[in-house]
Amino acid sequence: MNSRIQQILDKAVDKNSLSKEEIIAVLLCESSHNDVLFRAADLVRKRHVGDAVHLRGIIEFSNYCRRHCSYCGLRCANKDLQRYRMTPDAIYQAALDAAALGYRTIVLQSGEDLFFDADTVAALVRRLKKLGVAVTLSLGERTYEEYRLWRKAGADRYLLKHETADPVLYQKLHPDANQAGRLDCLSWLRELGYQVGSGCMVGLPGQTAEMLAADLLLLKELDVEMAGIGPFIPHPSTPLAEAAAGTAEMTLRMVALARLLLPLAHLPATTALATIDGYGRTKALSCGANVVMLNVTPLEYRSMYEIYPNKNRADSTPAAARRQFEELLAGLGRPVAEDVGHSPKSKFQRTVS
Ligand code: SAM
Ligand code: SF4
Protein backbone atom coordinates (compact mmCIF):
# COMPACT_ATOMS: atom_id res chain seq x y z
CA MET A 1 0.00 0.00 0.00
CA ASN A 2 1.36 3.40 -1.04
CA SER A 3 1.60 5.30 2.23
CA ARG A 4 0.79 8.65 0.54
CA ILE A 5 -2.62 7.33 -0.61
CA GLN A 6 -3.23 5.84 2.85
CA GLN A 7 -2.41 9.19 4.45
CA ILE A 8 -4.78 11.03 2.10
CA LEU A 9 -7.58 8.57 2.83
CA ASP A 10 -6.99 8.78 6.59
CA LYS A 11 -7.26 12.56 6.34
CA ALA A 12 -10.43 12.32 4.25
CA VAL A 13 -12.12 9.96 6.73
CA ASP A 14 -11.10 12.18 9.61
CA LYS A 15 -11.73 15.66 8.19
CA ASN A 16 -13.99 15.13 5.14
CA SER A 17 -11.77 17.54 3.28
CA LEU A 18 -9.02 17.16 0.68
CA SER A 19 -7.00 19.50 -1.51
CA LYS A 20 -7.29 19.36 -5.29
CA GLU A 21 -3.85 17.72 -5.50
CA GLU A 22 -4.86 15.04 -3.00
CA ILE A 23 -8.06 14.28 -4.92
CA ILE A 24 -6.11 13.99 -8.16
CA ALA A 25 -3.62 11.61 -6.50
CA VAL A 26 -6.50 9.33 -5.50
CA LEU A 27 -8.18 9.53 -8.90
CA LEU A 28 -4.93 8.54 -10.60
CA CYS A 29 -3.66 5.93 -8.15
CA GLU A 30 -3.23 2.29 -9.14
CA SER A 31 -6.25 0.01 -9.16
CA SER A 32 -4.72 -1.97 -6.32
CA HIS A 33 -5.80 0.93 -4.05
CA ASN A 34 -9.48 0.64 -4.95
CA ASP A 35 -10.27 -1.68 -2.07
CA VAL A 36 -8.96 0.63 0.58
CA LEU A 37 -10.61 3.69 -1.04
CA PHE A 38 -13.96 1.95 -1.32
CA ARG A 39 -13.78 0.63 2.24
CA ALA A 40 -13.02 4.13 3.56
CA ALA A 41 -16.04 5.53 1.71
CA ASP A 42 -18.24 2.69 2.95
CA LEU A 43 -17.16 3.41 6.51
CA VAL A 44 -18.00 7.11 6.17
CA ARG A 45 -21.35 6.25 4.57
CA LYS A 46 -22.23 3.93 7.45
CA ARG A 47 -21.08 6.39 10.08
CA HIS A 48 -22.92 9.45 8.70
CA VAL A 49 -26.02 8.23 6.85
CA GLY A 50 -26.37 4.64 8.05
CA ASP A 51 -27.24 1.47 6.16
CA ALA A 52 -30.69 2.39 4.85
CA VAL A 53 -31.08 2.83 1.11
CA HIS A 54 -33.58 5.39 -0.15
CA LEU A 55 -35.62 4.23 -3.12
CA ARG A 56 -36.98 6.99 -5.31
CA GLY A 57 -39.52 6.45 -8.08
CA ILE A 58 -38.66 8.42 -11.21
CA ILE A 59 -41.23 9.36 -13.85
CA GLU A 60 -39.67 10.46 -17.14
CA PHE A 61 -42.71 12.32 -18.39
CA SER A 62 -41.53 14.12 -21.54
CA ASN A 63 -38.60 13.64 -23.90
CA TYR A 64 -39.12 16.95 -25.71
CA CYS A 65 -36.15 19.22 -25.21
CA ARG A 66 -35.27 22.67 -26.47
CA ARG A 67 -31.54 22.26 -25.88
CA HIS A 68 -28.49 21.02 -27.76
CA CYS A 69 -26.32 19.34 -25.10
CA SER A 70 -23.90 17.48 -27.32
CA TYR A 71 -23.89 14.27 -25.24
CA CYS A 72 -27.63 13.69 -24.87
CA GLY A 73 -29.97 11.65 -27.04
CA LEU A 74 -32.89 13.95 -26.16
CA ARG A 75 -31.21 17.04 -27.70
CA CYS A 76 -33.66 18.84 -29.96
CA ALA A 77 -31.60 18.28 -33.10
CA ASN A 78 -32.01 14.50 -32.78
CA LYS A 79 -34.67 13.81 -35.39
CA ASP A 80 -34.31 10.01 -35.01
CA LEU A 81 -36.18 10.10 -31.74
CA GLN A 82 -39.93 9.67 -31.43
CA ARG A 83 -41.11 12.32 -28.98
CA TYR A 84 -43.75 11.88 -26.27
CA ARG A 85 -45.41 13.77 -23.46
CA MET A 86 -47.44 12.18 -20.73
CA THR A 87 -50.56 14.06 -19.67
CA PRO A 88 -50.73 15.45 -16.12
CA ASP A 89 -53.37 12.80 -15.34
CA ALA A 90 -51.10 10.00 -16.61
CA ILE A 91 -48.19 11.39 -14.57
CA TYR A 92 -50.41 11.55 -11.49
CA GLN A 93 -51.57 7.96 -12.05
CA ALA A 94 -47.95 6.75 -12.36
CA ALA A 95 -47.12 8.56 -9.11
CA LEU A 96 -50.17 7.09 -7.39
CA ASP A 97 -49.12 3.59 -8.47
CA ALA A 98 -45.57 4.24 -7.29
CA ALA A 99 -46.78 5.49 -3.91
CA ALA A 100 -48.88 2.32 -3.58
CA LEU A 101 -45.71 0.28 -4.14
CA GLY A 102 -44.07 2.06 -1.22
CA TYR A 103 -42.17 4.91 -2.89
CA ARG A 104 -41.97 7.93 -0.60
CA THR A 105 -40.26 10.20 -3.11
CA ILE A 106 -41.41 10.85 -6.65
CA VAL A 107 -38.90 12.35 -9.06
CA LEU A 108 -40.36 14.11 -12.10
CA GLN A 109 -37.83 14.37 -14.92
CA SER A 110 -37.98 15.59 -18.51
CA GLY A 111 -36.10 17.41 -21.22
CA GLU A 112 -36.38 21.17 -21.09
CA ASP A 113 -39.95 21.19 -22.31
CA LEU A 114 -41.70 24.55 -22.01
CA PHE A 115 -44.99 22.90 -22.97
CA PHE A 116 -45.09 22.12 -19.25
CA ASP A 117 -45.47 25.73 -18.20
CA ALA A 118 -45.07 27.02 -14.68
CA ASP A 119 -48.73 26.67 -13.71
CA THR A 120 -49.10 23.15 -15.12
CA VAL A 121 -46.09 21.94 -13.14
CA ALA A 122 -47.24 23.75 -9.98
CA ALA A 123 -50.69 22.15 -10.21
CA LEU A 124 -49.10 18.74 -10.68
CA VAL A 125 -46.79 19.23 -7.68
CA ARG A 126 -49.80 20.19 -5.54
CA ARG A 127 -51.62 17.02 -6.58
CA LEU A 128 -48.60 14.82 -5.89
CA LYS A 129 -48.02 16.35 -2.48
CA LYS A 130 -51.49 15.16 -1.46
CA LEU A 131 -50.13 11.61 -1.81
CA GLY A 132 -47.85 12.29 1.17
CA VAL A 133 -44.68 11.89 -0.88
CA ALA A 134 -41.62 14.09 -1.25
CA VAL A 135 -41.38 15.61 -4.72
CA THR A 136 -38.14 16.10 -6.61
CA LEU A 137 -38.16 18.05 -9.87
CA SER A 138 -35.55 17.69 -12.59
CA LEU A 139 -36.79 19.84 -15.46
CA GLY A 140 -33.59 21.69 -16.35
CA GLU A 141 -32.94 25.41 -16.39
CA ARG A 142 -36.01 27.54 -15.80
CA THR A 143 -36.59 31.02 -14.43
CA TYR A 144 -36.36 32.10 -10.80
CA GLU A 145 -40.10 32.77 -10.81
CA GLU A 146 -40.88 29.26 -12.02
CA TYR A 147 -38.65 27.67 -9.39
CA ARG A 148 -40.31 29.89 -6.77
CA LEU A 149 -43.80 28.91 -7.82
CA TRP A 150 -42.97 25.18 -7.74
CA ARG A 151 -41.33 25.48 -4.34
CA LYS A 152 -44.43 27.26 -3.07
CA ALA A 153 -46.55 24.48 -4.55
CA GLY A 154 -44.64 22.05 -2.33
CA ALA A 155 -41.68 20.76 -4.36
CA ASP A 156 -39.04 19.60 -1.89
CA ARG A 157 -35.97 19.00 -4.03
CA TYR A 158 -34.51 19.92 -7.39
CA LEU A 159 -31.92 17.99 -9.36
CA LEU A 160 -29.80 20.00 -11.78
CA LYS A 161 -26.41 18.54 -12.50
CA HIS A 162 -23.57 20.97 -13.12
CA GLU A 163 -22.36 18.33 -15.65
CA THR A 164 -18.72 19.51 -15.60
CA ALA A 165 -17.05 22.16 -13.49
CA ASP A 166 -14.60 23.00 -16.24
CA PRO A 167 -15.81 26.19 -17.99
CA VAL A 168 -14.13 25.44 -21.34
CA LEU A 169 -15.42 21.88 -21.52
CA TYR A 170 -18.85 23.09 -20.38
CA GLN A 171 -19.01 25.55 -23.27
CA LYS A 172 -17.95 22.90 -25.79
CA LEU A 173 -20.67 20.54 -24.61
CA HIS A 174 -23.37 23.22 -24.40
CA PRO A 175 -23.14 25.43 -27.49
CA ASP A 176 -26.48 27.07 -26.67
CA ALA A 177 -25.93 27.66 -22.95
CA ASN A 178 -23.33 28.79 -20.47
CA GLN A 179 -22.00 27.67 -17.16
CA ALA A 180 -22.81 30.93 -15.40
CA GLY A 181 -26.49 30.40 -16.22
CA ARG A 182 -26.41 26.88 -14.81
CA LEU A 183 -24.71 28.04 -11.62
CA ASP A 184 -27.22 30.89 -11.26
CA CYS A 185 -30.03 28.32 -11.34
CA LEU A 186 -28.29 26.30 -8.63
CA SER A 187 -27.94 29.36 -6.41
CA TRP A 188 -31.61 30.31 -6.93
CA LEU A 189 -32.66 26.79 -5.94
CA ARG A 190 -30.59 27.08 -2.79
CA GLU A 191 -32.02 30.50 -1.99
CA LEU A 192 -35.57 29.18 -2.43
CA GLY A 193 -34.99 26.45 0.13
CA TYR A 194 -34.93 23.40 -2.12
CA GLN A 195 -32.81 20.42 -1.18
CA VAL A 196 -30.37 20.79 -4.04
CA GLY A 197 -29.05 17.93 -6.12
CA SER A 198 -26.26 18.43 -8.62
CA GLY A 199 -23.57 16.23 -10.11
CA CYS A 200 -21.44 15.43 -13.11
CA MET A 201 -20.60 12.93 -15.79
CA VAL A 202 -17.36 10.97 -15.69
CA GLY A 203 -15.31 10.24 -18.80
CA LEU A 204 -16.48 13.12 -20.99
CA PRO A 205 -14.26 13.64 -24.03
CA GLY A 206 -11.32 15.84 -23.04
CA GLN A 207 -12.05 15.56 -19.30
CA THR A 208 -8.96 15.25 -17.10
CA ALA A 209 -8.43 14.12 -13.50
CA GLU A 210 -7.95 17.76 -12.60
CA MET A 211 -11.39 18.58 -14.00
CA LEU A 212 -12.93 15.70 -12.05
CA ALA A 213 -11.29 16.99 -8.88
CA ALA A 214 -12.84 20.39 -9.66
CA ASP A 215 -16.23 18.65 -9.97
CA LEU A 216 -15.92 17.25 -6.47
CA LEU A 217 -14.73 20.55 -5.03
CA LEU A 218 -17.64 22.36 -6.71
CA LEU A 219 -20.12 19.88 -5.20
CA LYS A 220 -18.55 20.57 -1.82
CA GLU A 221 -18.66 24.33 -2.35
CA LEU A 222 -22.33 24.11 -3.36
CA ASP A 223 -22.85 22.01 -0.25
CA VAL A 224 -25.33 19.88 -2.17
CA GLU A 225 -27.86 17.65 -0.49
CA MET A 226 -27.52 15.16 -3.35
CA ALA A 227 -24.77 14.40 -5.87
CA GLY A 228 -25.47 12.30 -8.96
CA ILE A 229 -22.28 10.97 -10.51
CA GLY A 230 -22.48 8.70 -13.52
CA PRO A 231 -20.39 7.71 -16.53
CA PHE A 232 -20.79 9.49 -19.86
CA ILE A 233 -22.20 7.02 -22.40
CA PRO A 234 -22.04 8.01 -26.09
CA HIS A 235 -25.30 8.17 -28.01
CA PRO A 236 -25.12 7.36 -31.74
CA SER A 237 -27.38 10.26 -32.78
CA THR A 238 -25.27 12.96 -31.13
CA PRO A 239 -22.05 14.80 -32.07
CA LEU A 240 -20.23 12.62 -29.49
CA ALA A 241 -21.28 9.33 -31.12
CA GLU A 242 -17.68 8.21 -31.65
CA ALA A 243 -16.37 9.18 -28.21
CA ALA A 244 -15.37 6.54 -25.66
CA ALA A 245 -17.61 5.94 -22.66
CA GLY A 246 -16.52 6.72 -19.12
CA THR A 247 -15.36 3.73 -17.10
CA ALA A 248 -17.06 2.10 -14.15
CA GLU A 249 -13.81 2.20 -12.20
CA MET A 250 -13.35 5.97 -12.46
CA THR A 251 -17.04 6.53 -11.72
CA LEU A 252 -16.79 4.41 -8.56
CA ARG A 253 -13.71 6.34 -7.46
CA MET A 254 -15.64 9.57 -7.93
CA VAL A 255 -18.60 8.22 -5.91
CA ALA A 256 -16.24 7.09 -3.15
CA LEU A 257 -14.47 10.46 -3.05
CA ALA A 258 -17.84 12.27 -3.05
CA ARG A 259 -18.83 10.28 0.04
CA LEU A 260 -15.55 11.14 1.76
CA LEU A 261 -15.95 14.84 1.00
CA LEU A 262 -19.73 15.12 1.48
CA PRO A 263 -20.51 12.73 4.34
CA LEU A 264 -24.17 13.74 4.69
CA ALA A 265 -25.08 13.91 1.00
CA HIS A 266 -27.47 11.53 -0.67
CA LEU A 267 -25.47 9.71 -3.35
CA PRO A 268 -27.37 7.66 -5.92
CA ALA A 269 -26.07 4.45 -7.44
CA THR A 270 -26.86 5.70 -10.94
CA THR A 271 -28.68 4.02 -13.80
CA ALA A 272 -25.85 5.07 -16.13
CA LEU A 273 -23.37 3.09 -14.03
CA ALA A 274 -25.73 0.10 -14.00
CA THR A 275 -25.93 0.41 -17.80
CA ILE A 276 -22.19 0.00 -18.38
CA ASP A 277 -21.63 -2.49 -15.55
CA GLY A 278 -24.24 -5.10 -14.62
CA TYR A 279 -23.06 -4.97 -11.00
CA GLY A 280 -22.70 -1.18 -11.03
CA ARG A 281 -25.44 -0.49 -8.52
CA THR A 282 -24.18 -3.04 -6.01
CA LYS A 283 -20.64 -1.72 -6.39
CA ALA A 284 -21.72 1.90 -5.90
CA LEU A 285 -23.78 0.95 -2.83
CA SER A 286 -20.61 -0.62 -1.42
CA CYS A 287 -18.47 2.50 -1.85
CA GLY A 288 -20.62 5.33 -0.59
CA ALA A 289 -23.97 5.37 -2.39
CA ASN A 290 -27.22 5.29 -0.38
CA VAL A 291 -29.93 6.12 -2.93
CA VAL A 292 -31.39 4.33 -5.95
CA MET A 293 -33.82 5.81 -8.44
CA LEU A 294 -36.03 3.16 -9.97
CA ASN A 295 -38.01 3.84 -13.09
CA VAL A 296 -41.77 3.99 -12.54
CA THR A 297 -42.58 5.45 -15.96
CA PRO A 298 -45.25 3.42 -17.80
CA LEU A 299 -43.49 0.82 -20.00
CA GLU A 300 -44.81 2.24 -23.28
CA TYR A 301 -42.62 5.36 -22.97
CA ARG A 302 -39.43 3.79 -21.68
CA SER A 303 -37.55 3.19 -24.93
CA MET A 304 -38.19 6.79 -26.03
CA TYR A 305 -36.40 8.36 -23.06
CA GLU A 306 -33.12 7.39 -24.62
CA ILE A 307 -30.55 9.74 -23.13
CA TYR A 308 -27.94 7.09 -24.01
CA PRO A 309 -28.29 3.60 -25.53
CA ASN A 310 -29.70 0.71 -23.48
CA LYS A 311 -30.82 3.04 -20.71
CA ASN A 312 -34.23 1.72 -19.92
CA ARG A 313 -35.41 -1.83 -19.59
CA ALA A 314 -38.95 -1.95 -20.83
CA ASP A 315 -39.48 -5.51 -19.67
CA SER A 316 -39.67 -4.94 -15.95
CA THR A 317 -42.81 -3.40 -14.44
CA PRO A 318 -42.40 -0.96 -11.55
CA ALA A 319 -43.69 -3.62 -9.16
CA ALA A 320 -41.30 -6.32 -10.44
CA ALA A 321 -38.31 -3.96 -10.51
CA ARG A 322 -38.93 -2.87 -6.95
CA ARG A 323 -39.34 -6.45 -5.72
CA GLN A 324 -36.15 -7.47 -7.46
CA PHE A 325 -34.29 -4.54 -6.01
CA GLU A 326 -35.55 -5.18 -2.49
CA GLU A 327 -34.20 -8.73 -2.78
CA LEU A 328 -30.84 -7.42 -3.92
CA LEU A 329 -30.70 -5.02 -0.96
CA ALA A 330 -31.67 -7.79 1.46
CA GLY A 331 -28.73 -9.80 0.09
CA LEU A 332 -26.43 -6.86 0.82
CA GLY A 333 -27.84 -6.49 4.35
CA ARG A 334 -29.07 -2.99 3.51
CA PRO A 335 -32.63 -2.12 4.62
CA VAL A 336 -34.96 0.00 2.52
CA ALA A 337 -35.41 3.40 4.18
CA GLU A 338 -38.92 3.88 5.50
CA ASP A 339 -38.94 7.66 5.82
CA VAL A 340 -39.36 10.16 2.96
CA GLY A 341 -35.61 10.46 2.74
CA HIS A 342 -35.03 14.17 3.16
CA SER A 343 -31.47 15.33 3.51
CA PRO A 344 -30.05 14.37 6.91
CA LYS A 345 -28.78 17.93 7.31
CA SER A 346 -30.69 19.19 10.33
CA LYS A 347 -32.50 22.07 8.62
CA PHE A 348 -34.15 19.67 6.20
CA GLN A 349 -34.94 16.96 8.72
CA ARG A 350 -37.36 19.41 10.23
CA THR A 351 -39.15 19.90 6.89
CA VAL A 352 -41.69 17.11 7.16
CA SER A 353 -43.69 16.76 3.97
N1 SAM B 1 -33.13 18.10 -18.93
C1 SAM B 1 -32.77 18.07 -17.56
C2 SAM B 1 -31.34 18.48 -17.36
O1 SAM B 1 -30.57 18.44 -18.31
O2 SAM B 1 -30.99 18.83 -16.24
C3 SAM B 1 -33.03 16.71 -16.91
C4 SAM B 1 -32.96 15.54 -17.80
S1 SAM B 1 -31.33 15.13 -18.39
C5 SAM B 1 -31.67 13.84 -19.50
C6 SAM B 1 -30.65 14.27 -16.96
C7 SAM B 1 -29.19 13.98 -16.99
O3 SAM B 1 -28.88 13.03 -18.00
C8 SAM B 1 -28.26 15.13 -17.31
O4 SAM B 1 -28.04 15.93 -16.19
C9 SAM B 1 -27.00 14.43 -17.79
O5 SAM B 1 -26.00 14.37 -16.80
C10 SAM B 1 -27.49 13.00 -18.09
N2 SAM B 1 -27.08 12.57 -19.44
C11 SAM B 1 -27.49 13.07 -20.62
N3 SAM B 1 -26.87 12.45 -21.63
C12 SAM B 1 -26.03 11.54 -21.10
C13 SAM B 1 -25.11 10.61 -21.64
N4 SAM B 1 -24.92 10.50 -22.94
N5 SAM B 1 -24.42 9.83 -20.78
C14 SAM B 1 -24.62 9.92 -19.45
N6 SAM B 1 -25.48 10.79 -18.88
C15 SAM B 1 -26.18 11.60 -19.69
FE1 SF4 C 1 -32.14 18.33 -22.84
FE2 SF4 C 1 -31.31 17.67 -20.37
FE3 SF4 C 1 -30.63 16.20 -22.52
FE4 SF4 C 1 -29.58 18.64 -22.24
S1 SF4 C 1 -29.27 16.85 -20.85
S2 SF4 C 1 -30.42 17.78 -24.14
S3 SF4 C 1 -31.28 19.72 -21.31
S4 SF4 C 1 -32.64 16.47 -21.69
Image (spheres, rainbow, N blue to C red):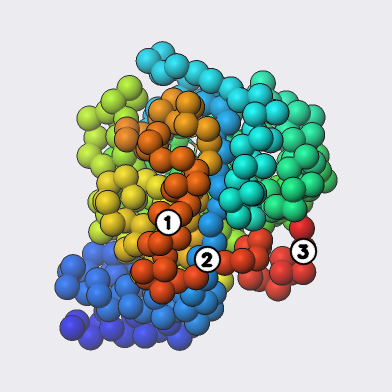
Looking at the image, can residue 181 be seen?
A: no
Label 3 CB-ligand 1 distance < 8 A? no
Q: Is residue 3 above or below residue 264?
A: below
Q: Is residue 99 left or right of residue 51?
A: right
**What residue occupies the far top of the structure in this picture?**
79
Question: Residue tagged by mark 1?
Answer: 325
Q: Is residue 72 left or right of residue 65?
A: left
Q: Name which residue type carries label 2.
A: Val
Which marked residue is nearer to the observer: mark 1 or mark 3?
1
Question: Residue tagged by mark 2?
Answer: 336
Query: In this view of the protein, which residue sits in the foreground, 268 or 34?
Result: 268
Query: In this view of the protein, which residue sits in the foreground, 94 or 351?
Result: 94
Helix, strand or loop status at disc 2: loop
Q: Is residue 84 above or below residue 8?
A: above
Mark found first going from the N terminus, 1 or 2: 1
Q: CA distance from mark 1 to mark 2?
A: 10 Å
Question: Residue tagged by mark 3?
Answer: 351
